[in-house]
Amino acid sequence: MSKPTSSENIYDRCLADLLVKAGVGFGAGVVASVILFRRRTWPVALSTGFGIGAAYADCDRSFNPARISGTRIITQQEESK
C-alpha cells in the first residue's frame, strides 16, 4: 500500500502542474496566434485557460480521488470482512 501523501506535497505538485500546463497552453496560443490568426490575442487567452482548467481538474482529482471514474473507496469496515 502506498504511503499517504501530505497536503503540502499535493499543493506543490498542483502548483508545478499549473505552471507547466499554463505555460504549454500559453506557448501553443502564441504559436497559433502568430501562424494562424494574424496575431490576435484570443488564441493565447483560450489556450492558457485550457491549460489552467486541465491543471485544476488534475488537482481536484488529487484531493478527491472519489471523482476518478472506476475508483472504489474501501473503508476500514470493508477491509475487516
Image: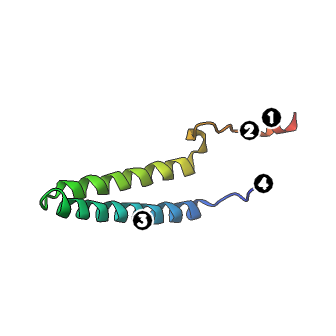
- Where is residue 79? Give x, y as percent: 83, 39
Q: Residue at x 15, y 56 (%)?
A: 37
Q: Which residue is mark 2?
A: 74
Q: Separation of disc 3 and disc 2 at Cα?
A: 33 Å
Query: Disc 3 residue type?
Result: Val
Q: Residue at x 52, y 65 (%)?
A: 12
Q: Which residue is mark 4?
A: 1
Q: Nearer the viewer, mark 1 or mark 3?
A: 3
Among numbered discs 3 and 2, the one appearing first in the sequence: 3
Q: Separation of disc 2 and disc 4 at Cα?
A: 13 Å
Q: Are marks 2 and 1 in contact (CB under 8 Å)?
A: yes
Among numbered discs 1 and 3, the one appearing first in the sequence: 3
Q: In terms of secondary structure, where does tag 2 sit?
A: loop
In the displayed structure image, the side of residue 30 where residue 25 appears, left or right? right
Mark 3: few/some/many CA within 10 Å (<14, 14-19, 20+):
some
Which circle marks residue 78 in the picture?
Answer: 1
Q: Nearer the viewer, mark 3 or mark 2?
A: 3
